Image (cartoon, grey):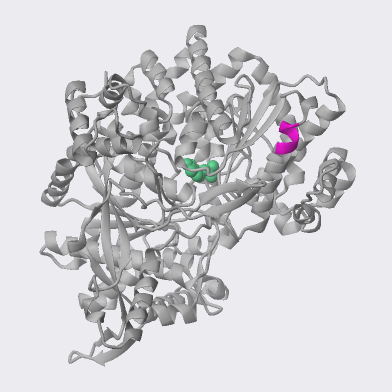
């Protein structure tokens, strides 16, 4: 049924032959004796055998055509697993599945042997991975640059209800998708001194000397386009000492040897681990090193490639390259490009600036103040002296420009200056040094223009634009939910796979009773699979006929997992008072990692687990409520939870969630959103219509108004609402006989005046869930709503997002 433009035309017979041979060659075993992991590696080799020739074909083609290319710079790529998606994109998945079945092997168990590449925290990192998938699948020449962290995001364990972090040793066994390319290593310079020399022509020349040198060694991962023979590249940099095996460090003095080892270790630390903070700045020097390490290695590579393929001056770089920076983390790309153009390519400041500000484009992901990146001047000057000089000069020129050309903004200079209060303000640098600044959903972009960045918007109105986030429907529907995908293709044909907007054809079937029954059946089967997973991992029996009410995302106060918990405690308290209350059984499912140093977030995890143990073990509740915290939420778990979800909880404080992408994945799998008017929830509501989503709570304007003018008192609500007082007192004093207390959560709400308006939105949230339950009981209507959500989810494919970036920002064409 599927497209003919597949990479591989292997038959089941041929695949069988290859897999037997691979296993034999690698392990000496027969396929019957081989372990799942060994079979995994065998299949990965077969896939690589198909990919690798096509990969160099793609690179040759790009060189020959010599079109403009996009480089996506990101400190995070939350890739997840690759075997099944590479099989799918190569057009080999069906054959692989049939082969394994024929051999009596369990495909799912074998694919599950792959460890997730967890090189990201959450939405921002997963977005980067979805973008690479769309770039390749849409025939764009676009590549990712990131860091090959030795340890990705920590593995989460729950012990006695508390989060424990374990190292994510994802490279312990061979990672079959990466290729080390030592020949393309580059040298990165830290610290040292900058000499200023006057040249004969009167211009200044800068020499950066006595530096600490670090080698950046690339490991390339192929990015396989969907059945189009395009293989792009994700290049991840690894930090190594210069000179490799350090023969020159052998000296007669023993002490030097250990100094050398120490030095080597400190260099390897640069790509040692991913910082585990989401939407929050960790102002450590090592993090700044990581940022410069990524930016310098990537830019050197981009310039080298340009010079190899173009005999023209670097003046024309903007015709051949565009660099998108994912949040401010890679903002040093701006001064680094300036440095290369001036100090190495000998261009003037004016020419270098002209080029730089036509190559760099910046995506903002948050307006949370704790996430705004600043670096102490002293740290930057010491670690990156030449880069700091350039930033200082950019700042001087920028501030002078405001003073002389924009008199109305003179008073705002302290708020606009890139260097202020002894800090370098990265978002300001990113705006000043780029040609495009985009938000990730319309509401978020408006907040940037009207509030957070309003003076910059006055200065550069044309720079600001919106690109609403998206998700790759290939991973999040086709791969994650094969049963639903097959059902969709059965009724509307498979064209939606290439043009996800065509999912809209499903609208015609939204009152077809036979089709709706099949939709219900698919959801039920997915819920049974998840129920089994929950039983295996948590030992909790959940009712697969109950409503699966799901909140999966990083744990953060603004995402308001606490509001969800309050809802559960409320229902529990009601059921205790009235055991015969007529309610539809519900299973509440959470998945969330907290940053290790985020105390309140960890308290919420503990609370969820506490509530779970009380509710799940209370026989008077008679299984009407179940609470499950699935540990170690990651991409692979998301792929199993999302297809089984009935209700998607997207309940952030309005104005705080820039876009959200979990909301899109869930909608695409037919879950109904209970959400605030925040981020892309607003767009989901527009797409499906008010009748097919459950919206509640304060608007972003109302929230802003409270922040600016006051008028909100959490204590008043506590004093007047019995339901809330009961819950908060339970937090303060422990639940019943139990001694565990949650005083910090209690105090944060009552004595820090509930900064995220949990109490304010509590009542409308309850009412909305009562409404949800009434609708759920009308089975036909519920299923229609499911189908409507799937039907209108096509616009949230990252294919749409990438086409917008390509035509409106990057100006690149499909090849
Ligand atoms: C999509 C995704 C996220 C982002 O979820 P939001 O609900 O948008 O915050 C985070 N983590 C993982 C593993 C994801 O797949």
Q: Which residues are drawn in magenta?
A: 613-617
Magenta stretch: residue 18 in it? no
- Vertical arrangement, residue 79 with respect to residue 643, above or below: below
Tell me if residue 347 can be seen: no
Tell me if residue 520 can be seen: yes
Q: Residue furthest top?
A: 514
Left or right position of 539 against 437:
right
From the image, which quarter does the C terminus lie in? top left
From the image, which quarter does the N terminus lie in? top left
Residue 558 placement (x, y as % from top left):
63, 50
Left or right position of 334 against 423:
left
Helix, strand or loop for the magenta stretch, by majority: helix
User: Could you say which quadrant of the image residue 768 lies in?
Assistant: top right
Left or right position of 559 against 247:
right
Query: Which residue occupies the foreground of this view, 270 or 19?
Result: 19
Query: Which residue occupies the foreground of this view, 670 or 269?
Result: 269
Left or right position of 116 against 21:
right
Query: What residue is drawn where x is 48% and y is 18%?
Result: 522
- Vertical arrangement, residue 32 with respect to residue 636, above or below: above
User: Could you say which quadrant of the image residue 681 lies in?
Assistant: top right
Query: What residue is drawn where x is 52% and y is 43%?
Result: 633
Residue 494 placement (x, y as % from top left):
32, 20
Residue 447 placement (x, y as % from top left):
56, 53
Query: Which residue occupies the foreground of this view, 480 or 394?
Result: 480
- How many callouts does the rendering have? 0
- Vertical arrangement, residue 489 with respect to residue 636, above or below: above
Query: What residue is drawn where x is 71% and y is 32%?
Result: 616
Query: What residue is drawn where x is 51% and y is 57%?
Result: 276
């Amino acid at each position: 049924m599927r497209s003919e433009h597949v990479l591989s035309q292997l038959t089941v017979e041929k695949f069988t032959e290859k897999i037997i041979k691979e296993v034999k060659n690698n392990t000496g075993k027969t396929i019957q004796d081989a372990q799942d992991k060994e079979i995994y590696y065998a299949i990965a080799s077969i896939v690589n055998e198909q990919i690798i020739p096509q990969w160099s074909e793609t690179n040759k083609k790009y060189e020959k055509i010599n079109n403009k290319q996009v480089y996506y710079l990101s400190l995070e790529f939350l890739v997840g697993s690759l075997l099944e998606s590479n099989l799918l994109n190569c057009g080999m998945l069906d054959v692989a599945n049939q082969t394994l079945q024929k051999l009596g092997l369990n495909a799912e168990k074998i694919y599950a042997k792959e460890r997730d590449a967890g090189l990201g925290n959450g939405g921002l990192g997963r977005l980067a991975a979805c973008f690479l998938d769309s770039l390749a699948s849409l025939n764009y020449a676009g590549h990712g640059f990131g860091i090959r962290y030795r340890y990705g995001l920590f593995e989460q364990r729950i012990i006695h209800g508390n989060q424990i972090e374990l190292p994510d040793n994802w490279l312990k066994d061979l990672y079959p998708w990466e290729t080390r390319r030592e020949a393309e290593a580059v040298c990165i310079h830290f610290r040292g001194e900058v000499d200023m020399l006057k040249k004969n022509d009167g211009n200044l020349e800068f020499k950066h000397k006595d530096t600490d040198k670090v080698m950046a060694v690339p490991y390339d991962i192929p990015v396989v386009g969907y059945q189009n023979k395009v293989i792009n590249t994700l290049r991840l940099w690894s930090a190594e000492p210069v000179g490799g095996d350090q023969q020159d460090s052998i000296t007669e003095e023993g002490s030097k040897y250990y100094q050398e080892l120490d030095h080597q270790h400190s260099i390897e630390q640069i790509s040692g681990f991913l910082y585990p903070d989401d939407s929050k700045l960790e102002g450590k020097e090592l993090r700044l090193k990581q940022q410069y390490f990524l930016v310098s290695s990537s830019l050197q590579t981009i310039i080298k490639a340009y010079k190899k393929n173009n005999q023209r001056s670097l003046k024309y770089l903007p015709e051949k390259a565009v660099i998108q920076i994912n949040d401010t983390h890679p903002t040093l790309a701006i001064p680094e490009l300036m440095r290369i153009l001036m100090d190495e390519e000998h261009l003037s400041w004016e020419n270098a600036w002209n080029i730089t500000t036509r190559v760099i484009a910046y995506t903002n992901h948050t307006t949370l103040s704790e996430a705004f990146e600043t670096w102490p001047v002293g740290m930057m000057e010491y670690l990156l002296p030449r880069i700091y000089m350039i930033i200082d000069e950019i700042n001087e020129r920028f501030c002078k420009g405001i003073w002389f050309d924009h008199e109305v903004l003179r008073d705002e200079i302290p708020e606009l200056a890139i260097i202020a209060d002894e800090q370098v303000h990265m978002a300001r640098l990113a705006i000043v040094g780029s040609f495009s600044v985009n938000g990730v959903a319309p509401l978020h972009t408006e907040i940037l223009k009207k509030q957070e960045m309003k003076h910059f918007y006055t200065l550069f109105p044309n720079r600001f634009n919106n690109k609403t986030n998206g998700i790759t429907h290939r991973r999040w529907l086709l791969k994650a939910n094969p049963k639903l995908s097959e059902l969709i293709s059965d009724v509307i044909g498979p064209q939606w796979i290439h043009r996800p907007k065509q999912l809209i054809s499903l609208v015609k079937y939204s009152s077809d009773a036979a089709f709706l029954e099949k939709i219900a059946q698919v959801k039920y089967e997915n819920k049974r699979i998840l129920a089994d997973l929950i039983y295996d991992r948590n030992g909790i029996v959940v009712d697969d006929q109950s409503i699966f009410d799901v909140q999966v995302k990083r744990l953060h106060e603004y995402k308001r997992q606490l509001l969800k918990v309050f809802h559960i405690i409320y229902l529990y308290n009601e059921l205790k008072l009235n055991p015969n209350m007529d309610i539809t059984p519900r299973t509440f499912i959470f998945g969330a990692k907290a940053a290790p140093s985020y105390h309140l977030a960890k308290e919420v995890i503990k609370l969820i687990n506490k509530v779970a143990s009380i509710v799940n073990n209370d026989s008077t509740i008679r299984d009407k409520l179940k609470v499950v915290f699935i540990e170690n939420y990651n991409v692979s778990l998301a792929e199993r939870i999302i297809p089984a979800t009935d209700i998607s909880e997207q309940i952030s404080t309005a104005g705080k969630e820039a876009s959200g992408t979990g909301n899109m994945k869930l909608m695409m799998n037919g879950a109904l959103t209970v959400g605030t008017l925040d981020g892309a929830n607003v767009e989901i509501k527009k797409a499906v219509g008010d009748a097919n989503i459950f919206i509640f709570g304060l608007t972003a304007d109302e929230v802003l108004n409270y922040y600016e003018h006051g008028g909100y008192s959490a204590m008043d609500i506590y004093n007047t609402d019995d339901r809330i007082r009961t819950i908060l007192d339970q937090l303060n004093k422990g639940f019943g006989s139990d001694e565990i207390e949650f005083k910090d959560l209690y105090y944060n709400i009552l004595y820090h005046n509930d900064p995220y308006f949990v109490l304010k939105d509590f009542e409308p949230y309850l009412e909305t869930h009562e409404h949800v339950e009434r609708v759920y009981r009308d089975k036909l209507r519920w299923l229609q709503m499911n189908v409507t959500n799937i039907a209108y989810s096509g616009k949230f494919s990252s294919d749409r997002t990438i086409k917008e970036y390509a035509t409106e920002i990057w100006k690149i064409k499909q090849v």
